Amino acid sequence: MKKLGARGQKWLKVFHLIFACLWVGGAVTLCSKQYFVNPTDGGELYGILWTLRYVDDFIIIPGAMGSLITGLIYSVWTNWGWFKHRWVTVKWVINLFGVIFGTFWLGPWLNSLPPIAKAQGLKALTDPAFIHNREMLLVFGTFQAATCVFAVFVSVLKPWKATGQRGRLPLRRQD
């Protein structure tokens, strides 16, 4: 299969970084708003939750899907491969886990909150379903954001050797 040239890889890197910034930035934004913004009335609660949903729908989801697609392109059309480097494999696990967990758990938990807040106002803070879903978002949303930040460190530091080297450095020819 034909590989991307140097110019194509530079463009791919630009798009991959943009999507990663969206995903990581959105995830950190959701965490900070959940922990540090305290509404004083039902309208504020609804507004805050609606903005969280907006960030999820229009920043995090496109960022996650863009990261997935550009990562796929990296693995197929460059020499990075799928499992050639452990750090690439770790990023794939983080990305797939993030997309799957976000789609089937985090997203539904978040999407359930604004309608409850709109109907009940601040009384939503005592609603058992609201409390459960909000706590799940606090715990697992923070975990997801932390894994996204970890993926950035892995991308920059590339901490593990290629999988075929068994922990040894390649021999260098000395002239």
Image (cartoon, rainbow, N blue to C red):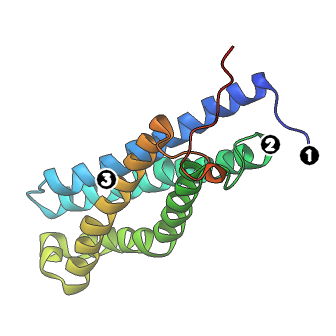
Res. 157 image quadrant: top left
Q: Quick one: which residue is furthest to the left in this view?
A: 40
Disc 1 and disc 3: Cα gap in Å?
40 Å
Tag 2: residue type?
A: Trp
- Whether tag 1 and tag 3 are in contact, CB under 8 A, the answer is no
Rendered location of residue 166, percent (x, y): 58, 53
Rendered location of residue 6, percent (x, y): 76, 23
Q: Secondary structure at mark 3?
A: helix
Identify the residue shown where x is 46% and y is 66%. 102
* Tag shown at residue 77: 2
Identify the residue shown where x is 50% and y is 46%. 160
Identify the residue shown where x is 40% and y is 69%. 106
Q: Residues within 10 Å of mark 3 (few under 14, many from 20)?
A: many
**Foreground mark, 3 or 2?**
2
Q: Quick one: which residue is furthest to the front in this view?
A: 175
- Whether tag 1 and tag 2 are in contact, CB under 8 A, the answer is yes
Identify the residue shown where x is 54% and y is 35%. 18
Name the residue tied to disc 1.
1
First in sequence: mark 3 vs mark 2:
3
Q: Quadrant of the C terminus?
A: top right
Name the residue tied to disc 3.
30
